[in-house]
Image: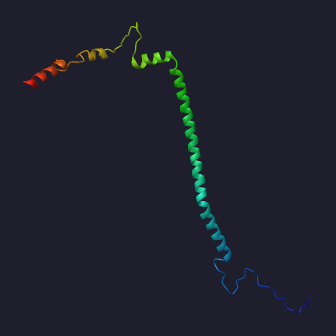
Amino acid sequence: MRTKAEPTVSAPPRDAPTGRARPALTGRALVLGALVVLLVVVLASPVNRYLSSRGDVTHAGQQLRDDQRQLADLTRQQARYSDPGYIQQQARQRLQFAMPGDTVYVVVDKGQQSGIEQTRGKTANQTATGRAWNTRLWDSVRAAGQ
């Protein structure tokens, strides 16, 4: 037991400055920092590959949806073209075909020439001089023989 006359010796508080300076980087902090750097280096490549593959999967899914939509459109178009009535309608509309016995009318606005009147000026085998190509050919053969 202690007596009142003996002085008690206590340890200095932990926060109290001691005679030596504390190092800025302890061994425990150095090991922890090295471990973090090692994890970053090791995991950087797999994480990059994972994220890029997710982007590729998203892009492939979008491409698949676009291709399926285009396939559905082409299937509908194929079904339409298997109908002879639709083929006849498209021939009349796009190519201006007429069935035998049909009367064809061309509606022309006022002041506009129809395609028939525009091409009626010359025949197909005449040039601007009015002579047919075979006449010009024969004339050039005769001129070369003289």
| Above/below status of 89 relative to 2 | above
Give percent across and percent down for residue 70: 53, 32
Give percent across and percent down for residue 120: 25, 15
In this rendering, position of residue 124 left or right of residue 46: left
What residue is shown at x 27% (from left), y 17% (from top)?
Answer: 119
Where on the picture, by quarter, is residue 15?
bottom right
What residue is shown at x 64% (from left), y 67% (from top)?
Answer: 36
Q: Residue furthest top?
A: 101
What residue is shown at x 66% (from left), y 70% (from top)?
Answer: 32
What residue is shown at x 59% (from left), y 45% (from top)?
Answer: 57
Q: Is residue 133 visible?
A: yes
Give percent across and percent down for residue 18: 70, 85
Quadrant assignment for the N terminus: bottom right
In this rendering, position of residue 94 left or right of residue 41: left
Give percent across and percent down for residue 78: 52, 24
| Above/below status of 90 relative to 57 | above
Q: Nearer the viewer, residue 99 or 111?
A: 99
In this rendering, position of residue 62 left or right of residue 133: right
Q: Nearer the viewer, residue 95 or 23?
A: 95
